[in-house]
Amino acid sequence: MVTLQIEHPVPSYAGWKQAFDSDPVGRQQSGVRRYRVLRPVDNPNFVMIELDFDSLGEAEAMLAALRALWGRVEGTVMSNPQVRLAEIMEAGEY
């Protein structure tokens, strides 16, 4: 499994969340198996998103779609996205 990790500041979490919930890139249709939205407890205007995929190819295709989207909304909904692709090596729950 591959995770696409994204983090960036937002001018308004509520505004960003509305845009995220509208799902302009079609997460499920693009192969996202699970997602997590995180926010630092000390910064309500910053988000971290993790999108899980079965394959690297699906994650790379989503990243390309997101970069196209970000080019249209940079500075309004979010800014300066930082991304990384990571392979899940181990997971556990207690």
Image (cartoon, helix red, strand yellow):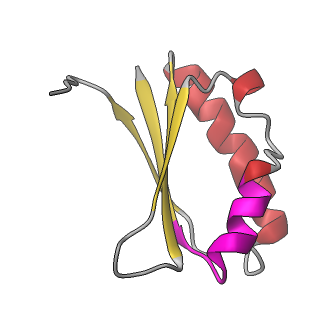
The residue at the point 50 percent across, 23 percent down is 56
Q: Is residue 48 left or right of residue 80?
A: left
On the image, the x and y values in percent for residue 3 come to 43, 34
On the image, the x and y values in percent for residue 80 come to 58, 73
The residue at the point 71 percent across, 33 percent down is 27
Q: What is the residue that sits farthest to the front in this orientation?
A: 94
Q: Quadrant of residue 89?
A: top left
The residue at the point 63 percent across, 73 percent down is 13
Task: Depth check: give the residue in front, 91 or 83.
Answer: 91
- The answer to whether 82 is drawn above or below residue 9 in the figure is above
Q: Quadrant of residue 10?
A: bottom right
Query: Where is the N terminus found, in terms of image quarters?
Result: top left
The residue at the point 72 percent across, 54 percent down is 20
Task: Depth check: give the residue in front, 62 or 94.
Answer: 94
- The answer to whether 45 is drawn above or below residue 17 in the figure is below
Q: Is residue 13 left or right of residue 45?
A: right
Task: Depth check: give the residue in front, 88 or 93.
Answer: 93
Q: Which secondary structure class fits the magenta region best? A: helix
Q: What residue range appears in magenta?
A: 8-20
